[in-house]
Image (cartoon, rainbow, N blue to C red):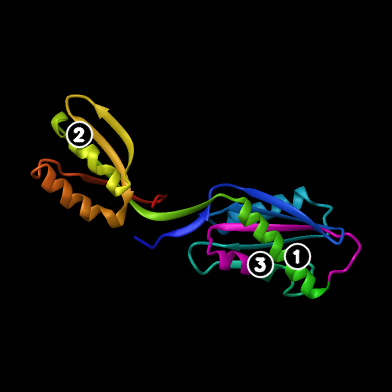
């Protein structure tokens, strides 16, 4: 699987006022360019009377990075917002910074600082998720082994997704993929190879 990545859990927003100009930073998780463009269109509709709706987005594919100054002097708005996303190392996100002009010009340097600050406020308001490659395993075993197996699961920071206590105990667990080999080895020794976990799925999850 690919390496882990950092993104956000859900939409977040924050704002501030700089020399009577109101800056509203809003960040949204997106996984495609279409989702990013839909979010930008939504914010433009919501803030139709704003002076500018500047945006930037970065997708996990590593190649899709876009930004727009939306009428501000070139390089003073979209690029600073994009820079914040790249410095924070987050992907699959789109940020729109809305500006309601307050009558006082900020100058190029002032605009860069203001748009950077609005983007950083939005990022800081969001719940960050560190998505790592994870493996979901399915196990079936006798009740006599349940205590032993339950005891070692916390060592691997395993999350129990499903449990079924029928004729046999059935557990579906998830752990980061880098721990699976060591878990297999310990489980094999612990149960004298009586329990053979099956890989159900590999996915990214917010798990360390």
Q: Is residue 3 above or below residue 143?
A: below
Q: Which residues are magenta?
A: 83-106
CB within 8 Å, label 1 to label 2: no
- Secondary structure of the residue carrying tag 2 is helix
In this figure, what is the number of numbered marks? 3
Image disc number at residue 147: 2
* Alpha carbon distance from label 2 to label 3: 54 Å
Q: CA distance from mark 1 to mark 2?
A: 57 Å
Residue 48, percent from left and from top: 81, 52
Q: Quadrant of residue 165?
A: top left
How far apart marks 1 and 3 lie (CA) works out to 16 Å
Q: Earlier in the sequence, mark 1 or mark 2?
A: 1
Q: Earlier in the sequence, mark 2 or mark 3?
A: 3
Q: Is residue 48 left or right of residue 143?
A: right
**Above or below, comparing residue 55 to residue 169 in the picture:** below
For mark 3, give the secondary structure. Answer: strand
Q: Which residue is mark 3?
A: 67
Asked if 86 appears above or below 100 in the picture, the reply is below
Residue at the image position 24 percent from the left and 37 percent from the top:
150
Q: Nearer the viewer, residue 37 or 27?
A: 27
Given residues 200 and 107, the one toward you in this image is 107
Residue at the spot 78% in from the left edge and 51% down from the top edge = 47
Between residue 184 and residue 204, name the one nearer to us.
184
Quadrant location of the N terminus in the rendered image: bottom left
Q: Nearer the viewer, mark 1 or mark 2?
A: 2
């Amino acid at each position: 699987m690919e390496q882990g990545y950092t993104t956000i859990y859900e939409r977040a927003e924050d704002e501030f006022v700089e020399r009577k100009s109101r800056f509203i930073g809003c960040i949204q998780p997106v996984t495609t360019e279409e989702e990013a463009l839909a979010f930008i269109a939504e914010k433009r509709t919501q803030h139709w009377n704003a002076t500018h709706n500047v945006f930037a987005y970065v997708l996990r594919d590593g190649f899709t990075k876009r930004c727009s100054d939306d009428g501000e002097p070139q390089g003073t708005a979209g690029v600073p917002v994009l820079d914040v996303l790249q410095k924070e190392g987050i992907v699959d996100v789109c940020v729109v910074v809305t500006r309601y002009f307050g009558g006082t010009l900020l100058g190029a340097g002032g605009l860069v600082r203001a748009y950077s600050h609005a983007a950083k406020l939005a990022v800081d308001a969001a719940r960050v998720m560190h998505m790592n490659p994870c493996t979901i395993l399915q196990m079936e075993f006798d009740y006599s082994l349940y205590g032993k197996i339950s005891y070692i699961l916390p060592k691997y920071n395993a999350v129990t997704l499903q449990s079924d206590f029928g004729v046999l105990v059935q557990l579906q667990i998830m752990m980061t993929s880098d721990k699976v080999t060591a878990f297999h080895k310990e489980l094999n020794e612990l149960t004298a190879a009586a329990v053979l976990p099956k890989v159900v799925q590999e996915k990214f999850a917010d798990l360390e």
